[in-house]
Amino acid sequence: MSDPDLTFETTELRQRVLSRWENEGGATTEMAVESSAEVPELTNAELVHLRMRVIALENLMIAVLAEGSDQQRQLALDMGGYIAPRAGATQHPLTVQASHHMTDLVHRADHFRAATFATTPYKSTPVFDEVTLPAGLRKEHRTKEGVWGVIQVLEGRLLYRVIEPRSETILDPEHPGLIHPDQPHSVEPLGPMRMRVDFYARPPDVPPT
């Protein structure tokens, strides 16, 4: 039969550790000392073997990402952003470094991906017209790092403004607009029109705008 006091203490300790991880990126040494089992220090030989295993796992993950789908690549980038410090949380160096390291692994995998254009978007917006086009798309905005966009005009015409480097292009069903990652831009309907935006994790097979 379990000891209710022990169960309460274990639950309380778990809550404190999880709270610490949420705010600072990991449990502290004081938390570890409070655990019931003593953890012996690793020997030099064990540390060397551990480092070898980490390097092997990193390169295995790079190989998996290099042959993975665009959706998997984007999910890895999103997860790296998710573990970054959130609003109101303490920016712990371990959390920041882990986030940057995940993003770095994805970019290292990009060097081994087939040098072909993406043909299928991993997601698309709904179709908008000159009335339903969101205000956020009419003013300056940008895609995430590592995300390309293609503005597909289904009917009518659309003014596509790139803020940096500055340019203006009129898009129509015969001329889609290419959006580069993290490139500030906006769009403006030129009369009745219908359009959507397709998103890619690799450069799409679309001529430069």
Image: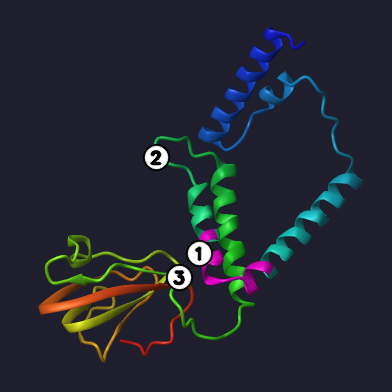
Number of marks present in the image shown: 3
Q: CA distance from mark 1 to mark 2?
A: 22 Å
From the top left corner, tell me how far across and down residue 197 is, in percent.
31, 73
Quadrant of the drawing holding the C terminus: bottom left
| Residue visible at 73% across and 9% down in the picture | 3
Quarter-wise, where is residue 62 in the image? bottom right
Please give the label number shown on residue 74. Answer: 1
Q: Is residue 6 left or right of residue 151?
A: right
Mark 3 or mark 2: name the one nearer the start of the chain: 2
Task: Tell me if residue 57 comes above or below residue 113 in the rendering.
Answer: above
Camera-nearest label, 1 or 2: 1
* Residue hosting label 3: 122
Per the image, label 1 sits on a secondary structure element best described as helix
Quarter-wise, where is residue 59 in the image? bottom right
Q: Is residue 78 left or right of residue 52?
A: left
From the top left corner, tell me how far across and down residue 122 is, in percent.
45, 70
Residue closer to the observer: 203 or 6: 6
Per the image, label 3 sits on a secondary structure element best described as loop
Label 3 neighbour load within 10 Å: few <14, some 14-19, many 20+: some
Q: Main secondary structure of the magenta part?
A: helix
Please give the label number shown on residue 153. Answer: none
The three-letter amino acid code for the residue at tag 1 is: Gln
Q: Is residue 106 visible?
A: yes
Camera-nearest label, 3 or 1: 3
Q: CA distance from mark 3 to mark 1?
A: 9 Å
> Which residues fall within the magenta stretch?
64-75
Camera-nearest label, 3 or 2: 3
Mark 3 or mark 1: name the one nearer the start of the chain: 1
Please give the label number shown on residue 87. Answer: 2
